[in-house]
Amino acid sequence: MLSLILNRLMSAIPSLIGVVIVTFLLTRALPGDPAAYFAGPAATEQAIAEIRAKLGTDRPLIEQFGRYVKDLVRGELGQSLTTGQPVAREIATRLPASAELTLIGLMLAVILAVPMGIIAATKPGSAIDHVTRVVSTAGVSLPVFFTGLLLVYVFYFRLGWAPSPVGRLDVFLSPPAHVTGFYLVDSILARDGEVFFGAAKQLALPALSLSIFALAPIARMTRASMLAVLSSDFVRTARASGLSPAEVIVTYAFRNAVLPVITTLGMVLSFLLGANVLVEKVFAWPGIGSFAVEALIASDYAPVQGFVLTMAALYVTLNLLIDIAYGLIDPRVRLDS
Amino acid sequence: MSGASPGALAHARYVIGENPVTGFAFGLFVLILIAAILGPALVPYDPLASNTSRALQAPSAQHWFGTDQLGRDIFSRVVVATRLDLTIAVASVALVFVLGGLSGIAAGFFGGWVERIVMRIADTIMAFPLFVLAMGIVAALGNSVTNIVIATAIVNFPLYARVARAEANIRREAGFVEAARLSGNGDARIVLFQILPNVFPILVVQMSLTMGYAILNAAGLSFIGLGVRPPTPEWGIMVAEGAAFMVSGEWWIAFFPGVALMLAVFCFNLLGDGLRDIVDPRRRT
Amino acid sequence: MATPALLVEDLSVEFRTRGGVVKALERVNFHVAKGETVAVVGESGSGKSVTAYAVMGILDPAARVTSGRAVLGALDLLQADRHTLAGLRGREIAMIFQNPRTALNPIRRVGDQIADVLLRHANVTPNAAPKTAIALLESVGITDPARRAKAYPFELSGGMCQRVMIAIALAARPSLLIADEPTTGLDVTTQAVIMDIIADRAARTGMATIFITHDLGLAAERADRIVVMHAGHVVEAQPKAALFATPRHPYTAALIAATPGSTSRLADLRTIAGGLPDLRAADLPACRYAARCPRRLALCAQPLPALDAAQKTALACHNPLPVERAA
């Protein structure tokens, strides 16, 4: 088991190196001279050259890369032009908002999609089977920002069930004491029911938008892999051995069927982290996605770079966890490594 | 697996007969194509002409999809936008078809360091959440429609490169390639005349499967304000413009472009599934 | 005659497919007595496995039993509800399959898979189950059973997996074992060992065995009685020696002629002309062998006589080979 984890950690390293190189190259591809940009339109040629020297952009590329890596190791992601704040700090304070939203969205999707896929596969032709098939085709076609807006219209404007789609918490409530940065968790730790429900209400629609988007591939894969496993030889053996239907479906079929679903989660997470940006924009969610969007519009590059890097690092880490979870379930992977 | 043999045609008819949804998708596709080609000539209003006296009107016989905050006819804008949205998606898919397809074939055919470099690039791209990488690329290259096309192509690169590599790899050892080599054909000729025609149908399926994603990706980028600039009619930006009005009840501004977007993506996803069933029945799920 | 371990009567099964309704079994009749080993032989597609699956109640969802009964003790398995059936399977009637490596759960330790069945059927406590499982592994001739119990199927050889399958099937001491091509794909030595284990258990416990195979030679070695199936029909049943000495159905005779070992010279081996009829056709002939049969008469278009499942012999032919024919 330990060797599996080490093995996977090692294999994540080239990915991380690639991520660092790509984010570095993206800065270098920036059109125009960042020094001129920093200096402003009124700057003299000499002032620009000074800033260039200060930024280090007059140095050879490889040396710049060395500095970039050194800064990264120290957790230095540069300064935001518009806010003047260090990007690293800004991202650190905003990350929990994005992480909470993404995780709740993913959890919702899994909780809905996996049983849907299982029922669809065990009762082919049933109503749930048809619903699953429609949802899994239509769900991937729905632009996530459009789903979000439709939900806002129905649940906020029409029904009035949801709060105004702005931010993580009603302005009249104050955030719970910071422990994890996840409002749901922190409010429970603070034993503050009002804040908990306030946060949950704000979270409901954006998380639902994300989960509708993520639901489709998970339900589709669960259904397909359950169908394949249910017609497999070993499920036939389990049935012929008279094991109870629940035991056949859970211990024998599902544990095998879940393996391809776990693999799919990697792809789903890639979509989800991207969709997160769009949902944050729709719901004015104070996460790193909306931070990056604001910076993008203002052509403020350092925050965007920090954002891309953070997201990629997050994604590589989550994929690593997925690989390890897979190995925990599948002895063939565990014992081969 | 080669293109249009009578067997493939019969199989195509069978797949469409078996799955009427594919037929529906094909009808939708024709409709989208008509809107894209003839759109500007068909619409009742100038998509850019604002008329503040008719701002924010709900859908009516006069304005089927209503009007936006500047009094522009949303139906006209949605139809005219088809061409731009489709062009971005087609251009990016065509670009990645050539880039990803060729480098994948090269990787699968030559192996060695070519394969290592191509696959390392693909793996590195896959290490990013794709939409996030697309944002970064557009930010770096500059905020323009061309760069949206390029970014969308780049994030799809791994899919094409991997499929093409796998297919080329299988066929490298196939009998007909060996025969061609023994009869004195060079590598270039073998790739061009033996490998490419065989990998082509599979890449075409990949194209229609990724068209939907390309449309979504491009619309997502313009939704957050990248690429297309107002007042150009484009679905993503139109949804963004209508977003603010959702909370005050003027749903139609964002709704109709959103539905157009959804239907287009839906159509290409279904077509992709249907086409895959025709070209490669084994991969049905 | 004593009450048989299993009596299958008038069993008909259909499959609904895209290409039409496949009449996979039509009025299949046979029985197996207590302690008896009956081999069911026939080409692939003859309905041997479908018969077993129907009896076990593990048919594909596309299949439908359209007539008949399968009586085990006093119970008709085809009418039993799901729970009764699940309680019987593995306890009274067990089955082993071909391809042992895919027939075991790939991500569960084999000891646990045996324990699952023990806990379900054999009144074994959760604490005692692992030990009993190890004892079962030992009883099917697995060396170092305590270590093997912790292995996953992919770590074991095909023959080893088939022993595990047998241990699972025999865990609850069933009164009937159905072995569906249990040795196909195994090497010859392993084949013999596997068959010996089954025969040994049957001899010691009085377990009845239905042994499904396409290999008439293997059936000749291992069975007391042989039931020959062709295209979803039982065409002939006889005790082994009688069947080889005086095959009555032309198809049986052709099968024997096509089996190595029954003739002295390889040159005498025959192939059977033609193939199985399309079982989707609406107008299947009364005798599904007629199109391939050298002894076909005009009479052969008439319905065949009904077979009696309780009899030791059966013959579905209008123009059988004469009894006095020299072997």
Image (cartoon, coloured by chain):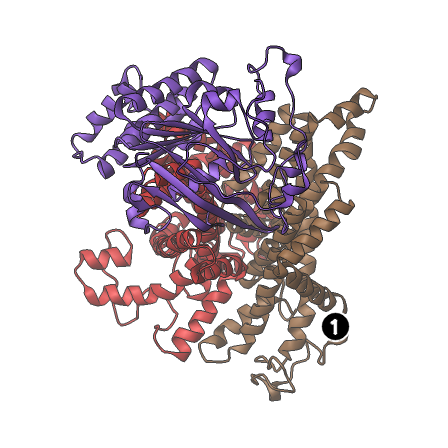
Colour given to chain C in the rendered image: purple
Q: Position of residue C239 (x, y in %)?
A: 44, 25
Pointer 1 indicates a residue of which chain?
B
Q: How far from the left and from the top, in percent, is residue C85?
A: 31, 45
Quadrant of the snapshot with the N terminus of chain C? top left
Work out whether residue C303 or residue C191 is closer to the camera in this orientation and state it.
C303
Instruction: Check the image and name the residue furthest to the right.
Output: B184
Q: Which residue: 70% across, 49% down?
A: B11
SS under mark 1: helix
**Residue type, mark 1 in image:** Pro
Quarter-of-image position of residue A322: top left
- Indicate the position of residue C29 as horizontal and vertical percent values: 45, 40
Colour given to chain A in the rendered image: red
Question: What residue is pinned by disc 1?
Answer: B40
Residue occupying image coordinates x 64% and y 38%: C290
Chain identifier, colour brown: B
Given residues A322 and A53, the one toward you in this image is: A322
- Nearer the observer, B130 or A28: B130
A110 vs B244, left or right, is left
Q: Looking at the image, is C133 positioned above or below residue B78?
A: above
Residue A14 rendering spot, x and y as whole percentages: 48, 31
Identify the image quadrant of residue A72.
Answer: top left
| Farthest top residue in view | C264
* Left or right: where B277 falls relative to C69: right
